[in-house]
């Protein structure tokens, strides 16, 4: 009886030990599984790519002309509205014409008076000349008549000049557009006093048939553009590829532009030079004063390109996370090009073709020395559409 009890106790004890070992083994397996998380990886290889460098830009019309009156007067009529497309010579504003019309009439009357005075002086001078020729009067008397005629002619010329000036002032009361374009804001309406000395313009006419996108290049960018001075700036600008414009909405403007000029002077304050790119805008989609980003393409061949999210930076040293043959992470210092599209890096040193790098979990799961279970990101991406099709 005691033997059976002992035997039963041994069996129970052995079973407990087996269960404990199984539990321990399962925990260890679970820990190992947790220590090797699945991480997406990619193989790096040489390839060609076209990264785009983006630069904040301000858009301005080809011409932005402030419309200012050339005479002072109250606005009697506004003929256009904000945002309206206008043609060259189209009437924009009319100023009060009463005083200027009166000035024209007064000048016309002065001209008539001066013309009469010239006619009388001319008649007197002619008579005096005949009397002088007959020695009836002295030379001095005739000279006085001639001088009076010259004075009358001068007064007539002055009266005509005043008439021209008065007519011009009257014409200036009708303010017209100096070019084709789009009307900007109109701060002053009927009844407001308009003056050439006013700080605020009546409006602005922007010729938006073509627009300029102004952006800046720093000194390093310009040196890269000119290949450290081996080419002239003008030659470099002509050889630049067509550029794109990203609008404030994030969309890309459908027409390409061309860099037209780069200022020859670098601003001492900003350390940058102003660049101007020209875009066609026949549709009028782009408006003066808008903002966007100019995208300059950079064509590269036989380079290694990796996602920026697959790297980290510590004390100005950038690291990529190489997966070795044992699936262990090796933090590898790399050097990258200054040219970037905000999503990818061009690796100039530190990586070799055929190496695998982790592309997710950087700085959290993925660290130097961690063992992972690599998952080929390219293969996963290729299998995903097939899986979705099978589900449908």
Image (cartoon, grey):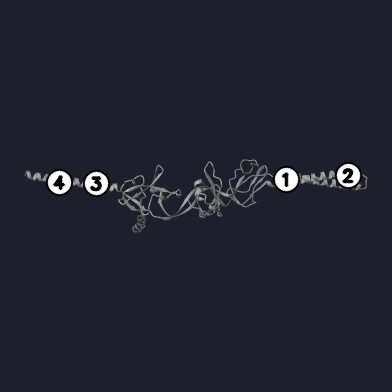
Q: Earlier in the sequence, mark 3 or mark 1?
A: 3
Residue 159, percent across and down? 77, 45
The one nearer the camera, 131 or 84, is 131
Q: Earlier in the sequence, mark 4 or mark 3?
A: 4
How far apart are the alpha carbons under marks 2 and 1?
35 Å
Q: Residues within 10 Å of mark 4 (few under 14, many from 20)?
A: few
Residue occupying image coordinates x 40% and y 51%: 306
Q: Residues within 10 Å of mark 1 (few under 14, many from 20)?
A: some
Residue occupying image coordinates x 82% and y 45%: 150
Mark in the foreground, 4 or 3: 3
In terms of secondary structure, where does tag 4 sit?
helix
The one nearer the camera, 194 or 270, is 270
Q: Quadrant of residue 265?
A: top right
Q: Quadrant of residue 380?
A: bottom left
Residue occupying image coordinates x 76% and y 46%: 160
Farthest left residue in view: 1
Q: Is residue 109 visible?
A: no
Q: Earlier in the sequence, mark 2 or mark 1?
A: 2
Q: Are marks 4 and 2 in contact (CB under 8 Å)?
A: no
Q: Residues within 10 Å of mark 2 (few under 14, many from 20)?
A: many
Residue occupying image coordinates x 71% and y 43%: 99
Mark linked to residue 142: 2
Mark in the foreground, 4 or 1: 4
How far apart are the alpha carbons under marks 2 and 3?
135 Å
Residue 230, percent across and down? 52, 51
Q: Which residue is mark 4?
A: 14
Q: Earlier in the sequence, mark 4 or mark 2?
A: 4
Q: Earlier in the sequence, mark 4 or mark 1?
A: 4
Quadrant into which the C terminus falls: bottom left
Q: Which residue is mark 3?
A: 28
Residue 134, percent across and down? 93, 47
Mark linked to residue 165: 1
């Amino acid at each position: 009886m005691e033997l059976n009890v002992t035997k039963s106790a041994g069996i129970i004890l052995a079973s407990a030990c087996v269960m404990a070992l199984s539990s321990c083994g399962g925990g260890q397996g679970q820990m190992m599984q947790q220590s090797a998380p699945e991480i997406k990886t990619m193989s790096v290889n040489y390839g060609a790519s076209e990264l785009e460098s983006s630069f904040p830009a301000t858009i301005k019309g080809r011409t932005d002309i402030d419309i200012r009156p050339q005479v002072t007067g109250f606005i009697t009529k506004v003929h256009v509205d904000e945002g309206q497309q206008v043609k060259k010579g189209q009437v924009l504003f009319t100023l009060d014409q009463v005083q200027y019309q009166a000035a024209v009439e007064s000048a016309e009357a002065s001209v008539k008076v001066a013309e009469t005075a010239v006619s009388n002086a001319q008649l007197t001078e002619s008579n005096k000349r005949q009397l002088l020729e007959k020695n009836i009067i002295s030379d001095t008397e005739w000279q006085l008549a001639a001088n009076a005629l010259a004075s009358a002619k001068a007064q007539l010329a002055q009266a005509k000049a005043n008439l021209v000036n008065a007519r011009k002032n009257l014409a200036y009361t009708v303010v017209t557009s100096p070019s084709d374009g789009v009307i900007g804001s109109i701060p002053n309406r009927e009844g407001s006093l308009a003056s050439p000395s006013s700080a605020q313009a009546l409006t602005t006419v922007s010729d938006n048939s073509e627009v300029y996108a102004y952006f800046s290049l720093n000194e390093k960018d310009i040196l890269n553009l000119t290949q450290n001075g081996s080419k002239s700036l003008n030659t470099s600008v002509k050889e630049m590829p067509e550029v794109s414009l990203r609008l404030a909405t994030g969309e890309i403007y459908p027409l390409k532009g061309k860099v037209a000029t780069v200022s020859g002077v670098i601003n001492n304050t900003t350390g940058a030079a102003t660049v101007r790119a020209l875009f066609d805008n026949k549709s009028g989609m782009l408006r003066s004063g808008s903002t966007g980003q100019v995208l300059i393409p950079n064509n590269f061949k036989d380079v290694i390109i990796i996602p920026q999210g697959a790297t980290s930076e510590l004390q100005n040293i950038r690291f990529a996370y190489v997966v070795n043959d044992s699936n262990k992470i090796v933090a590898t210092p790399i050097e990258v090009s200054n040219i970037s599209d905000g999503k990818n890096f061009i690796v100039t040193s530190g990586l070799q073709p055929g190496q695998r790098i982790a592309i997710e979990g950087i700085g959290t799961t993925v660290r130097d020395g961690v063992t992972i279970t690599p998952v080929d990101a390219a293969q996963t991406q290729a299998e995903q559409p097939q899986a979705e099709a099978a589900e449908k």
